[in-house]
Amino acid sequence: MILLVTVPDGSSLNLEPEDGPLCRVWSFFRSKVSGFAKKIWKLGADDPRKFIHSIKVGLALALVSVFYYMRPLYDGVGGTAMWAIMTVVVIFEFTVGGSLYKGLNRATATLSAAFLAWSIHWLASKFGEPTEHIILGASVFILSSAATFSRFILTVKTKFDYGVTIFILTFNFIAVSGYRVDDLLALAQRRLFTIMIGVSICIIVSIVVFPVWAGEDLHLLIIRNMEKLANSLEYSATEYFKEGENADAHKSFYQKSQGYKCVLNSKASEDSLANLAIWEPSHGPFRIGHPWKQYLKVGSAMRSCSYSIEALNSFINSEVQVPRSLKNHLSDVCTKLSLEYHKVLKEAAKFLRTMRKSSTIELMMAEMNEAVEDVHSVLRSLKPAAEEEQKQHMLATESVNMMKVLPLISVVSLLIEISVKIEGIVDAVQDLADLAGFAADDNEKQEEIKPANSEETQRNETMKVIQQV
């Protein structure tokens, strides 16, 4: 309600009453609902596959619920139709590999546990009471303990952890309940049949309706991380040696130089996707037996490089100010070296994206090693330059302090060491190409390039130059 108030000068003012408690509560509730709706919309907009996955789960549950709604189907499976619904709920995963992994583990574990429980029950029944009780109780204790201990074995935990859990559950369910059930074999058969129905519906919906492949996600994850690593190397050196005064440019360089952190944090995702990808059938350019484990070696090589970049950034962000004149001596060669790193990693990423062997990557590696040698050469000339600067400014400024030079030397030595890490990444990618049978690039001639220097040789050369400085 709006109040009309007349003031002494004869004019009128419209006054709106203060919101009451209910209005404030409603405003608070509306703002929370609006904020939550925006988050939900952003979640779906960032990755529409999540929204599609939700629809796929609903579709699978709707299909399996038909066994409850239709009397002929319900009579065929009996009261165990609920197991089919439970199966869909627990095994339908985001990726095809995840659904296949859980589905096959659940079906195999249920079959083996049901057969084993029925066999032990049949054997125990031949002895009569009380021996039957002892045999059943001992089998539950021994098999449950052994199966639980097997989950600590790395191979079992990686590939069959879910299956072992279902084995324990099914075996105990049938072994214990079988003592009070007359037709134990029929019970086991009905449960196995309904679980197979749920698994089949999950797998069909997961593969047919907008499939999400774990192998494809792993392939793209490695490519994206490699490109981020390339940008980190380029922009880290540029930020350090150029020292642009533009705040916006500095912020942009800093953000792009932090891409290596994605590589450091992606190990768990890589391991999970690789373990799920091995369960998937052929899809797209990926065939059965594709070397998914080799992607983990590529990721490990990139993380080794990322640790060096992290150390590099710690010196770049050091509060110790290096004399600008010394930086100028190394600016061009170090910037060129970081650009060569960027080019090699970008070519390796393209190598993976197109799944065709590159005929230019060896040439790029040779150019990268030449840039490393250029940095070594400039480092050797750093000491005479410093002495000349000291002579020219002896009366006006203090001599070059070694503590101020050390961060610069550390940055340069780390840049040189990264060349060995880049070689490791390229070697891992080339091994992947050989194992996966990538097609050769026929557009350009392959050239034999002199092998790159080993890590020990690079480090020894760097240490010699540092000692000279």
Image: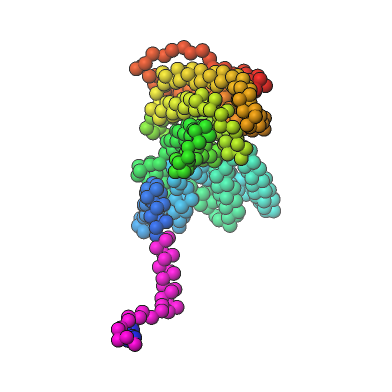
Residue drawn at x 52%, y 32% is: 241
The front one of 301 and 204 is 301
The picture places residue 317, in percent across and down from the top left corner, at: 58, 39
- In the picture as drawn, the residue positioned furthest to the front comes out as 395
Q: How is the image coloured?
A: rainbow
The front one of 356 and 3 is 3
Q: Is residue 18 magenta?
A: yes
The picture places residue 109, in percent across and down from the top left corner, at: 54, 43
Q: Quadrant of the C terminus?
A: top right
Whether 210 is drawn above or below 281: the answer is: below
Whether 388 is drawn above or below 135: the answer is: above
Residue drawn at x 38%, y 80% is: 17
Residue drawn at x 60%, y 53% is: 176
Residue 286, can we see it? yes
Q: Is residue 267 magenta?
A: no
The front one of 133 and 90 is 90
The front one of 26 and 378 is 378
Q: Quadrant of the N terminus?
A: bottom left
The picture places residue 465, in percent across and down from the top left corner, at: 63, 20
Residue drawn at x 49%, y 44% is: 102
Question: Which stretch appears magenta?
Answer: 8-36
The picture places residue 147, in percent across and down from the top left corner, at: 63, 43
Whether 23 is drawn above or below 304: the answer is: below
Residue 57, can we see it? no
Could you tell whether 133 is left or right of 174 in the image?
right
Label count reads 0
